[in-house]
Image (spheres, helix red, strand yellow):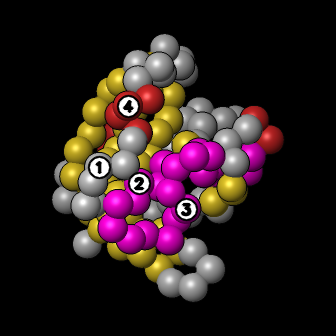
Amino acid sequence: DLELPIVLGANEEHLKQGAAHLTQTSYPIGGENTNCVLAAHRGYYKAPMLREVERLQIGDTVYVQNFRETLTYTVEELRIIDPTDVDALLIQPGRDLLTLVTCHPLGGNSQRYVVYCVRS
């Protein structure tokens, strides 16, 4: 039941506003051969952001509302990665993905918690 605005471009100012779209990933409009990567703070003191991301489970639904429609995604995989593992955020050929990324563990940032979602 969390709603965050999507701000294009991941920088510190945008991360304070909501979910920041990572530059050089697909725009949040869906389609084959896309992976829209959205990053958000996990423990920002002014808003909940993705604080409870670990409550998401495989099979849960995530919605992205863009300028023309609402896209529906299903959580497919949960993974903890190193901050330098950019390969984990690449497009997977033939797939329509949404990837949510936040720091891990809660209160730290030595790793990243990643939620992979596939278009339903």
The mark that comes first in sequence, 4 or 2, is 2
110 lies above or below 120: above
Amino acid type indicated by mark 1: Gln
The magenta segment is: 14-37
Category of crowding for the residue at label 1, using alpha-carbon neighbours closer than 10 angstroms: few (below 14), some (14–19), many (at least 20): few
Amino acid type indicated by mark 4: Asp
Q: Secondary structure at mark 2?
A: strand
Q: Is residue 12 visible?
A: yes
Residue that mark 2 sits on: 35
Mark 3–mark 2 CB contact (< 8 Å): no
Q: Secondary structure at mark 4?
A: helix
Mark 2–mark 1 CB contact (< 8 Å): yes
Question: Label for residue 92?
Answer: 1
Residue farthest to the right, as pictured: 13
The mark that comes first in sequence, 4 or 1, is 4
Q: CA distance from mark 3 to mark 1?
A: 15 Å
Question: Label for residue 27?
Answer: 3
